[in-house]
């Protein structure tokens, strides 16, 4: 853990994939299904892991090489498969529910900002039994027009707090850049899919969910 305590944080916003839960099995399954249905050659598992948490439409265009019209079709196939199978293949990280309880005890407002379709994120949080801890969940619209920064901004607006009073917790450079664009603090996690201990980093990094409590010792809650 690289510890740089944050002061006066009232709102904690979490990325979903790789931060709240290990969703890799369902995401990889849906990508494989969609790629096969669209006649695309098989993609190595590591490449599929590398796109977890990203914008789906951009992934099918920029990573898998689809034209936009075909990418839109692929995303629709992906989402249908994910709705039927993928959302049930996720497991909340160890001690994450305990973290949510402690944040509640500190008086923090809690949100989620995810490029996953919002309806899927809410259903998965309910299935994992932790939806009750979240004040707001902001996810991707079905037109795939939201960015991480815009979703973080929606959470901040919902909380009616200052940007300097909010922090985004995430596991990827997409989260990092989204927090910077949205003007909020950032904490990176190494237990997810993205950041690893050997990646140069200039912000607070935690290796397990409950370490976030130490980072937020100076927070004042609502």
Image (cartoon, rainbow, N blue to C red):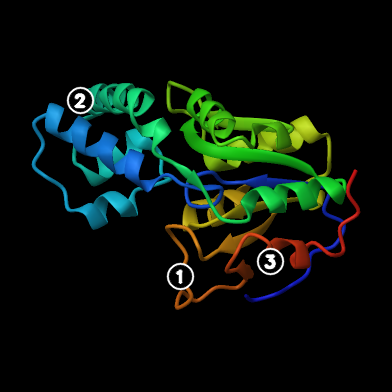
Splitting the image into 4 quarters, where does residue 75 fall? top left
Q: Which residue is mark 2?
A: 70
- The residue at the point 43 percent across, 27 percent down is 144
Question: Of the residues tagged 2 and 3, which is closer to the observer?
Answer: 3
Marks 2 & 1, CB-CB < 8 Å contact: no
Image check: 106 left or right of 156? right
Q: Residues within 10 Å of mark 2 (few under 14, many from 20)?
A: some
Q: Secondary structure at mark 2?
A: helix
Judge whether 142 appears above or below 125 on screen: above
Image check: 109 left or right of 94? right
Q: Residues within 10 Å of mark 1 (few under 14, many from 20)?
A: some
First reached walking from the N terminus: tag 3 or tag 1? 1
User: Residue 128 at x, y = what percent?
Assistant: 55, 36
Q: Which residue is mark 1?
A: 196
- The residue at the point 54 percent across, 41 percent down is 148
Q: Which residue is mark 3?
A: 211
First reached walking from the N terminus: tag 2 or tag 3? 2
Q: Secondary structure at mark 3?
A: helix
User: Residue 56 at x, y = what percent?
Assistant: 36, 35
Splitting the image into 4 quarters, where does residue 112 fall? top right
Question: Which quarter of the rendered picture does the N terminus lie within?
Answer: bottom right
The answer to whether one can see residue 92 in this image is yes
Image check: 146 left or right of 13? left
Judge whether 44 appears above or below 16 on screen: below
Tell me the distance, in whole angstroms, between the alpha carbons under discs 3 and 1. 16 Å
Tell me the distance, in whole angstroms, between the alpha carbons under discs 2 and 1. 34 Å
User: Residue 14 at x, y = what percent?
Assistant: 62, 46
Question: Of the residues tagged 3 and 1, which is closer to the observer?
Answer: 3
Judge whether 56 appears above or below 200 on screen: above
- The residue at the point 8 percent across, 41 percent down is 41
């Amino acid at each position: 853990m690289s510890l740089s305590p944050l002061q006066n944080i009232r709102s904690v916003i979490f990325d979903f994939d790789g931060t709240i839960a290990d969703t890799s099995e369902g995401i990889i399954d849906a990508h494989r299904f969609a790629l096969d249905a669209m006649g695309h050659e098989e993609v190595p598992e590591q490449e599929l892991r590398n796109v977890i948490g990203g914008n789906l439409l951009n992934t099918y265009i920029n990573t898998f090489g689809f034209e936009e019209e075909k990418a839109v079709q692929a995303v629709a196939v992906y989402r249908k498969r994910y709705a039927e199978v993928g959302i049930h293949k996720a497991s909340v990280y160890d001690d994450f529910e305990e973290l949510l309880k402690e944040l509640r005890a500190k008086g923090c407002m809690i949100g989620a900002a995810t490029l996953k379709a919002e309806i899927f994120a809410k259903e998965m949080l309910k299935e994992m039994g932790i939806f009750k801890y979240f004040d707001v969940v902001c996810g991707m619209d079905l037109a795939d027009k939201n960015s991480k920064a815009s979703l973080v901004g929606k959470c901040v607006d919902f909380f009616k707090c200052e940007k300097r009073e909010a922090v985004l917790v995430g596991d990827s450079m997409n989260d990092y850049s989204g927090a910077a664009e949205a003007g909020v603090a950032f904490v990176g996690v190494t237990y997810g899919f993205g950041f690893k201990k050997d990646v140069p980093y200039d912000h607070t990094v935690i290796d397990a969910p409950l370490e976030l409590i130490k980072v937020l010792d100076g927070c004042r809650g609502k």
